[in-house]
Image (spheres, rainbow, N blue to C red):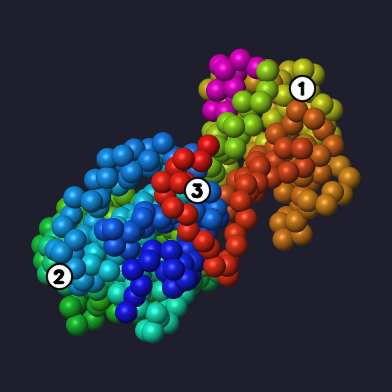
Amino acid sequence: MKSDKSDDAFVCRCVSDMLNGLSDGLSHFSGLSQVAVIYCVSKNSPMMICDPQNLLQEHRPRIKRMLIDDCFWKSVDASELEQARVSRVFSVQDLELTGIIEYGGQSGAVYYQAWFTKQHSDLCSIGPVRRWLEHAVWCFSHDIANGEEMYTGISGAFLRGYSLHAVRDHIVDEMNIYLGWDSQIRVYPLLDAVLAVSNTPEEGAWPVGELVFVDPQLLGEVRFVARFLWDECPQLKNSKHVRKLLLTVEHSDYKLISDGKAILGISENVLPDFVIQADFHGRHGFMKINDTRICSFSEGSFSSSTRCAQLVEVEEALLGFAISSQVKNTLFQIVTRLAHHAQSQRHGCTLVLDLNPQPVIMSGQKLDSPLDLRQPDLLKLSTALTRVDGALHIGADQHLHGFACLLDGRSIPAEDRGRGARYNSALRFTAAHKNIIVVVVSSDRPASVIREGVALSSICHWYPESGCVFSSDNLQEWCAKS
């Protein structure tokens, strides 16, 4: 039987195993991820918090108001929960912490628990992450109910590899809302097929086009332009055949239609109210529900990334310069336009944002008269210049001073041999020159924002401590800390 003490060694071990697994799994799915949990094993136990990466420290006032002052979580009858034991976990209201994704629940085994993680800016949807946290709630309740004698530690390992299940669970939840509980589509085979097709080149080219999954009860609403004979429909599990058929809808408004088992035909861009879509973009693609992205996929796995250049670090870096807000905003819009264009065209680029009073001297193609990038036609011309090897040199005057520029500098310790010359040249150049921000845009990975020899997007203010057993703090005492 489990102990009634919320801070005993067994509970700490359960919490630690799950936090380690959750952090590792979410870090692979969304990038480096902090996680935390607040829990109370029984109604009369103290509320505890385990926040080893300081995710929640800026939210102490709201957590205190919601969980200690208001105590909304104590309104549930403990005897009602005890009767359900772990056969049912009741969801609880979110604390609505800014920049945080959370999921909480109550059960007979754990009177209250809420799991938290950071909401990354580069996120297609919070849905799969919430399903991940929801599963953590179920796992914790199950482990505490079984007790130390039956504890295997498998929950942490399962949370580490939960990405496929999180995507599936989110799709199933949305499908149940739209179609009810009797949908005939099995989601796991569907997702396996999408990953297989995405890894199948055809004559050296990666898949482009859209594969749409329609529940059989909604097929009457599909406007087919070509439908295959029923007994000759290509099977979805034949990824090579499906990949060949995608050629028929490549770079068009037509879509391949599947019922989750076979490819039924080709349709126009008129679809039922609920569909699941796999949108292939070459080496990567997106899973969608009704044209709303829920995740991306690449190299045989799913990710939360939108795969668009996220330039929050540029905006933050500009705050440190003594220039007007209007100029900062214009420069940010210029960089965003150029970066997104280069990424969408899959060629990448390097942008040098030079905020010195007099632009530094760079070797490259200089211009007799710098181009005013505030003018839409000249900004459009500059998007074409990103295709040329070398960097675009943009001054604080919001003008383009050169293109095809070479970035030089001495070797520095921060270089990463796993990255290309474009990235490491930017590290060297910014280490050698002040007041320079360099944005390195790749066609197949997030943009890197570099200043003073450091990639700002890689700066981390906490360090993972996987394998550790974390201690929990009394929530009331934690909230009282300054």
Locate residue 393 relative to residue 199 in the image: left or right.
right
Observer-side mark, 3 or 2, equals 2
**Of residues 453 and 447, the one drawn nearer to the viewer in this rendering:** 453
> Label 2: which residue?
83
Q: Amino acid at mark 2?
A: Gln
Tell me the crowding category of disc 2: few under 14, some 14 to 19, or many 20 or more residues within 10 angstroms, Cα based.
few
Q: Position of residue 440 (x, y in %)?
A: 66, 44
Seen in the picture, residue 327 relative to 72 is either above or below; the reply is above
Q: Amino acid at mark 3?
A: Leu
Q: Position of residue 375 (x, y in %)?
A: 56, 19
Q: Which residues are magenta?
A: 323-333
> Label 1: which residue?
356
Q: CA distance from mark 3 to mark 2?
A: 34 Å
Kindly check if marks 3 and 1 are in contact, taking CB atoms under 8 A apart as contact.
Answer: no
Q: Position of residue 318 (x, y in %)?
A: 63, 27
Q: Position of residue 138 (x, y in %)?
A: 31, 68
User: Is residue 8 visible to us here?
Assistant: yes
Q: CA distance from mark 3 to mark 1?
A: 36 Å
**Mark 3, secondary structure of its residue:** loop
**Mark 1, secondary structure of its residue:** loop
Which residue is drawn at the image coordinates 41% and 55% (left, top)?
Answer: 48
**Mark 2, secondary structure of its residue:** helix
**Of residues 215 and 105, the one drawn nearer to the viewer in this rendering:** 105
Tell me the crowding category of disc 3: few under 14, some 14 to 19, or many 20 or more residues within 10 angstroms, Cα based.
some
Q: Amino acid at mark 1?
A: Asn
User: Is residue 166 visible to us here?
Assistant: no
Kindly check if marks 1 and 2 are in contact, taking CB atoms under 8 A apart as contact.
Answer: no
Tell me the crowding category of disc 1: few under 14, some 14 to 19, or many 20 or more residues within 10 angstroms, Cα based.
some
> Label 3: which residue?
55
